[in-house]
Image (spheres, grey):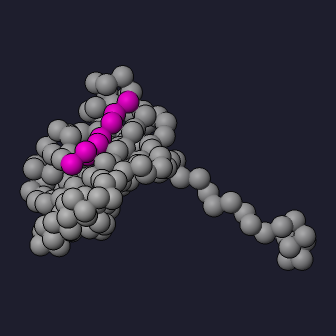
Amino acid sequence: MAERIEGGGSGPSEQALAAARWWAEKLGSKAPPDNGDRSPQGGMAKFLAVMVQQRTEVGADALARFESILAAKVDELLESGGGHASLSVDYDPDRTLSDAAREAGLDVGVWPWKSSVSVYMGGEVKARYGYGGEWVRIFPVDPPARTDAPEEQAKVGF
């Protein structure tokens, strides 16, 4: 069973929520797609994708529905997939992302090209945005590193 949010019991796991939130934020931000193609043809593909993206309205209500539906689907994948779920977009979304968008009534237009999220039951969630993007842990989130030196702490009474 996936680790549930404190007091939630039947709600989505923290890992599923983190993955769904990441995708919803990317869809809502309309960040320019990146397929790694720096040729003139790649530039034209990006230009056309941005035009479609700018003409597509992604509403907050639909994004919230998408996030909720996707979180439930991620937990289903974790249960049936041996504790791991993967969500990805090459140029089009995988089936899980596509189904969640359709069920939420979300017309995306252009998905974040070459992007992926990996979810591990009871563990971490990693995401990669765009062509050649670095894998970044999005759950659990590490607390910010302390930048004050011990001598600075002594000045303020630590």
Looking at the magenta stretch, what is its main secondary structure?
A: strand
Quadrant of the rendering where the N terminus is positioned: top left
Residue at (33, 59) in percent of width and height: 38
In-image side of 69 versus 4 (left or right): left
Tell whether position 65 is magenta: no
Horizontally, residue 73 falls left or right of residue 55, namely right
The answer to whether residue 2 is seen in the rendering is: yes
Extent of the magenta region: 84-91
Q: Nearer the viewer, residue 103 or 113?
A: 113
Pick whichever, 17 or 31, lies toward us. 31
The residue shown at (31%, 25%) is: 81
Residue 62 place in picture, x, y as percent = 16, 62
Q: Quadrant of the C terminus?
A: bottom right
Residue at x 15% of width, y 71% of height = 51
For residue 103, above or below residue 27: above
Q: How many marks?
A: 0
- Res 47 → quadrant: bottom left
Q: Is residue 85 magenta?
A: yes
Q: Is residue 83 above or below residue 92?
A: above
Q: Residue furthest front?
A: 40
Image height of 128 relative to 119, above or below: below
Q: Quadrant of residue 153?
A: bottom right
Residue 28 in sight here: no
Quadrant of the rendered image containing residue 110: bottom left
Percent position of residue 150, x then y? 87, 65
